[in-house]
DNA sequence: CTGTTAGCGCATTCAC
DNA sequence: GTGAATGCGCTAACAG
């Protein structure tokens, strides 16, 4: 079943069928109706590959993430797909599994499929492939990249505002002894968060002794272990902020195992606001990164870049979500 | 940059370039080397669309799920992608958002992209599109479909074994008053689980009064509400099994809010073994569905169906994972 | 082992 | 408003 058959049945040329499908206005209503009837009758549907080959455009957008099992991503992916679908576009999702080699592979695949744009939401992308995108004039947008490359748009998350609000929140209810579990320093975003925390503390004249900053790895077990380390220090902090929610969830567990109560003995603040953070026990106070906003901004920027041919820097604001894991110190 | 250019630079025909790329053994090492050098030099990469158009095969496999933000799916998607990638294939993931119309749309897209096979892990697929797959001889495999269609393979989850083990576990540690929070009866799988529970109870001569079966909707809030309902009954059950982990997590919250302790006052058993179930407080005893096994079986079956041209019914076993949310009744 | 050639299904000129 | 013809980049017969 192909366009030729449809043309034959509708008694028109293939060009007219093509025009009808693509909504060209240069087709009389009468003819269009005949074509549509033929399409219906033959249960015809166009071949995307042929269409892309013929036109040069694929209506496909790439989305590269680290790992779909990281709870930060599902909502992001979904929002991106939703907005793309609303605009009649499709999405090709690829996981890098935090592996630069695989990341390059993903990017290459996007290139091979002639995607109309790619949103890169991971930091493993340092390869030469990026140049190919530039050369092919395929729009690119990064989330939180450290480097500001030539022809690449960026989503810049304003960690400062959310973390500042979190420190302020803790401080305002009486906390002064606040510790932090950081993320892996290889991540630009983790470093920014840590800096924002330290800055917020300094601004209020609050001390941050070295052992009040433990290193996690943005996983639950990493958070657990970091918290275990922290719980042997003396004196204990009265509040702990973390580099992401998974870390906080792990920390939560360590605190409970130690027989301490949240927020009675220790207040806890996460970062990201992943779904489960509303359902931990207690529910987690955290800093929300609006993932749907990230997804939509990324998509619209990519679309925009196709004609405008300029790059954009898009700020994304974060905000404090206060739940039950924070309270005044005992 | 296309195959013609490469051929020119390597001083061979396009056919030879094509053969080299596709690893045909009918190319002399010497020639192949020259071609590879040209490819390297020109930074050439083949156009997937053209390749699919020319060959008829796309090396693309479709994976249709309900909703990537449902924690059951990320691990499944990841495993499917991993196994596909290991075999040099790609994956197109589509969310139906539990919407039959959108489900049809997803299937249509797969069709348009000439996928080599589709794994359908959702139950919204009742459309005519399925016939098109059959007509195109595109292998299809369903997860837990109620209907056993003609040319469609099936993954059949053995709910009975896991749930039986769970009931046995509770019974063996002294429970006799066991309630159940069911899933939406529109889901075939939810009905099977409920039946398996009732059967397990009957087999042991344990009563299941009507109010000991509440209806949830497989979401956290649904589980919460169902549990709230259950907690006003008298006498309270000493153990509660649920149709999935999200339901259990919601129930957990309701129980805690009521001031009851898990497992001291009420034991709780989930179903699915999603990642967070290892990190709830307390950790959740649950029945594990091996999602990587589902993904791999689905993929291999699809590949197999391409040459074998027969259908397969693949059993998937479930097993009990005992954690901290179950204990003998007080 | 290698080259020639004919499509794959569609979009897109350029005529009419 | 419509049709005929060309080409997108590649694969697969077929020849040699």
Image (spheres, coloured by chain):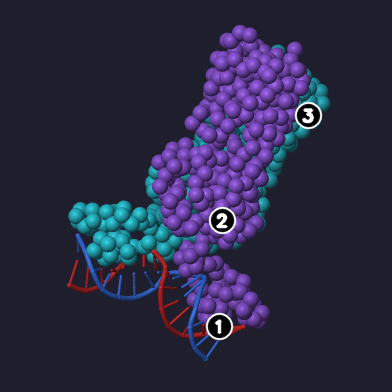
Chain colours: A purple, B cyan, C blue, D red
**Circles 1 and 2: CB atoms closer than 8 Å:** no
Q: Residue placed at 65% from the left, 14% from the top? A: A237
Query: Label 1: few (<14), some or many (≥20) within 10 Å?
Result: some
SS of the residue under disc 2: loop
Residue A251 visible in this rendered orientation of the protein: yes
- A213 left or right of A238 in image: left
**Mark-to-mark CA distance, 1 and 2:** 45 Å
SS of the residue under disc 1: loop
Q: Which residue is mark 1?
A: A11
Kindly indicate whether the residues beneath marks 1 and 2 are on one polypeptide chain: yes
Residue A12 falls in which quadrant of the image? Answer: bottom right
Q: Which residue is mark 3?
A: B228
At which x and y percent is residue B21?
A: 31, 56
Q: Which residue is mark 2?
A: A310
Kindly indicate whether the residues beneath marks 3 and 1 are on one polypeptide chain: no
Query: Label 3: few (<14), some or many (≥20) within 10 Å?
Result: some
At which x and y percent is residue A202?
A: 65, 22
**Circles 3 and 1: CB atoms closer than 8 Å:** no
Q: Residue placed at 50% from the left, 49% from the top? A: A150
- A13 left or right of B210 in image: left
Kindly indicate whether the residues beneath marks 2 and 3 are on one polypeptide chain: no
Residue C6 falls in which quadrant of the image? Answer: bottom left
Q: Tell me which chain the residue with mark 3 is part of.
A: B
Q: Tell me which chain the residue with mark 2 is part of.
A: A
């Amino acid at each position: 079943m192909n366009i030729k058959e449809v043309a034959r049945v509708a008694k028109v040329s293939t060009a007219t069928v093509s025009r009808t499908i693509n909504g060209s206005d240069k087709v009389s209503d009468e003819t269009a109706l005949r074509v549509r009837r033929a399409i219906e009758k033959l249960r015809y549907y166009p071949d995307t590959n042929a269409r892309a080959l013929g036109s040069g455009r694929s209506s496909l957008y790439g989305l590269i993430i680290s790992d779909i099992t990281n709870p930060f991503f599902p909502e992001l992916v979904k929002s991106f797909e939703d907005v793309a679908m609303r605009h009649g576009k499709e999405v090709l999702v690829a996981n890098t599994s935090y592996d630069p080699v695989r990341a390059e592979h993903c990017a290459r695949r996007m290139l091979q499929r002639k995607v109309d744009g790619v949103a890169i939401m991971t930091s493993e992308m340092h390869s030469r492939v990026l140049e190919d995108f530039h050369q092919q004039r395929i729009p690119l947008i990064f989330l939180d990249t450290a480097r500001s490359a030539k022809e690449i748009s960026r989503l810049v998350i304003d960690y400062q505002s959310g973390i500042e609000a979190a420190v302020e929140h803790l401080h305002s209810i009486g906390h002064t002894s606040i510790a932090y579990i950081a993320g892996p320093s290889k991540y630009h975003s983790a470093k920014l968060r840590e800096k924002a925390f330290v800055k917020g503390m300094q601004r209020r004249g609050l001390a941050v002794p070295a052992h009040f900053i433990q290193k996690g790895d943005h996983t639950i077990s990493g958070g657990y272990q970091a918290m275990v380390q922290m719980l042997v220090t003396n004196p204990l902090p009265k509040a702990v902020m973390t580099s992401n929610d998974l870390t906080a969830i792990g920390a939560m567990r360590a605190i409970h195992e130690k027989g301490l109560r949240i927020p009675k003995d220790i207040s806890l603040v996460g970062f990201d606001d992943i779904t489960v953070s509303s359902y931990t026990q207690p529910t987690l106070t955290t800093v929300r990164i609006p993932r749907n906003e990230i997804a939509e901004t990324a998509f619209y920027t990519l679309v925009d870049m196709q004609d405008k041919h300029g790059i954009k820097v898009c700020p994304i604001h974060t905000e404090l979500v206060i739940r039950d894991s924070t309270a005044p110190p005992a």
